[in-house]
Image (cartoon, rainbow, N blue to C red):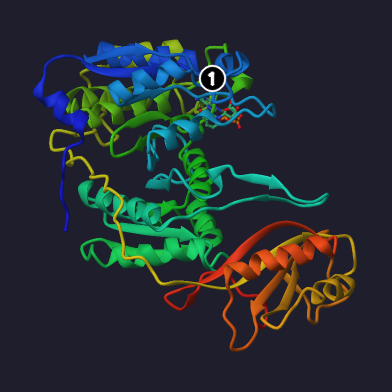
Amino acid sequence: MTIHLKQPNQILAQASPLPVPVTVAPGDGIGPEIMQASLKVLLAAGANIALEPIEIGKAVYLAGETSGIPANAWDSLRRTRIFYKGPVTTPQGGGYKSLNVTVRKALGLLANVRPCVAHAPAIATRHPDMDVVIVRENEEDLYAGIEHRQTDEVYQCLKLISRPGCERIVRYAFDYARAHGRKKVTCFTKDNIMKLTDGLFHRVFDEIAADYPDIASDHMIVDIGAARLADTPHAFDVIVMPNLYGDILSDVAAQITGSVGLAPSANIGEHCAMFEAIHGSAPDIAGQDIANPSGLLLAGVMMLLHIGQHKVAEKVHNAWLATIEAGIHTADIFRPGHSAQKVGTAAFAEAVIARLGQTPKVLTPASYATHAQAVTVWPAQKRKKALKELIGIDVFIHADAPVAELADALKTVENGLFELTMITNRGIKVWPGGLPETFCTDHWRCRFMAREGKQFNRAMVVELLRHLTQQGLDFIKTEQLYTFDGVPGFSLGQGQ
Ligand code: NAD
């Protein structure tokens, strides 16, 4: 079933000739240069937008706001629900949080859509037929940013994947494919290793693919998928993937179209949307008027389509195509003997403005007159709760002792109800059994399960931890082991 609802902002744009309010932030590094260039083109083309400037990024961080965005900026974002954003520098250390991650999560921008398209022969690339859209999950995975140092030697980062998160991003990818006349959606995961988290993403992909018989679907392990994407990108159409893989592989995909400076991105949520280039603030070339503004400008085209200004979007896109086709190139895509003229950021924008109203002769012109309907962002679905049963516990212990000594100490806390069943070190089972060659750190996972015929319960957890404390064992975290409708909700050790 497909419902093509309009986004709230599109309704606004079509019902009213008033300019559509857009929150805008130039960002850091090359941000102000490429934002000025992009806005100049959009406004010259007749974009009917009213800009609400906000300040974000380095200056805000250094003023003591660790999120990089001042409290009053949220008022503008929640009012306009459209954000046109330049790249931001996240200062290293100092507890500074990534502004991008904060904005994406706070505004519920679950889908990050990154078209990576070759423009041969205008822009030199080894992959002239490449036309890939990466749909990156935008809110979950390792980007939860929940990290801990647990022992002298070991640090951890939590990878969180939810069923509603998977369902919404995968459905978005299929709806996007359908709305844009795309033929295939491929899923990349690493579920041969991460059977529960990436396994869920893959399983949900297979479930939802069945609802779209008109769209082909397949799955690849992300390592071979990445290799094929770099080698034969024309074999792909739409690719949906968890956050981290999507972040990395969209840079790869953009770079092999000619430059990371070319690719735009749309961050789409149920209520708000944010448009930006995929690249960062490029401090190495900031202030030199040499950055390519194309990624941000094309993000502006995506924004105009989102707010229903299709004609202006088409005009800007075609003028941009005509400019690159004329060989007017910024330094990142300039090739002597191939390009006609090397220009800076501002001159590139002027060249695009001079071509407003033109269409490219060799490259395929953009045509948005019959542009696809807006893609629905589905609300999270509620599901029937599973029967959840506690059957054991993993206790993580910081200890420098050899495993045999640790096991002996842990065996003393066993009782008639629960027993120690396994110790692993960095995921490798080292007790019972284990090889002397295995390198062990000071971080041990110790699994206790109910004895045969006994039922594990919360009181046992308290009892166990009390005994461990009495033994002087430094437990640093626990993970309860549950079954859900009888299916284990935890990974097994080798041989279990
Ligand atoms: P980057 O994307 O800024 O730069 C990588 C390389 O690509 C550099 O050599 C740069 O000169 C080049 N490049 C990038 N954009 C270009 C353009 N438009 N034209 C020509 N060349 C371009 O990545 P980085 O150096 O790893 O990161 C710099 C900063 O940007 C970091 O603080 C990082 O956290 C931040 N960042 C922000 C965003 C964002 O705001 N969305 C995204 C990625 C990185």
Image quadrant holding the C terminus, namely bottom right
Q: Is residue 94 visible?
A: yes
| Badge 1 residue CB within 8 Å of ligand 1 | no
The mark tally for this picture is: 1
From the top left corner, tell me how far across and down residue 216 is, in percent.
29, 63
Which element type, helix, strand or loop, lies under badge 1?
A: loop
From the top left corner, tell me how far across and down residue 292 is, in percent.
47, 22
- The residue lying at 29 percent from left, 21 percent from top is 79
From the top left corner, tell me how far across and down residue 243 is, in percent.
48, 47
Q: Is residue 29 visible?
A: no
Q: Quadrant of residue 68?
A: top right
Closer-to-camera residue (156/383):
383
Image quadrant holding the N terminus, namely bottom left
Closer-to-camera residue (346/208):
208
Which image quadrant shows ligand 1? top right
- The residue lying at 69 percent from left, 26 percent from top is 94
- In the displayed structure image, the side of residue 222 where residue 307 appears, left or right: left
Q: Which residue is mark 1?
A: 57
| Residue type at numbered disc 1 | Gly
- The residue lying at 48 percent from left, 55 percent from top is 161
Closer-to-camera residue (447/255):
447
- In the displayed structure image, the side of residue 71 where residue 176 appears, left or right: left
Residue density around tag 1, few if under 14, some if 14–19, many if 20 or more, within 10 Å: many
- The residue lying at 41 percent from left, 72 percent from top is 387
- In the displayed structure image, the side of residue 14 where residue 230 appears, left or right: right
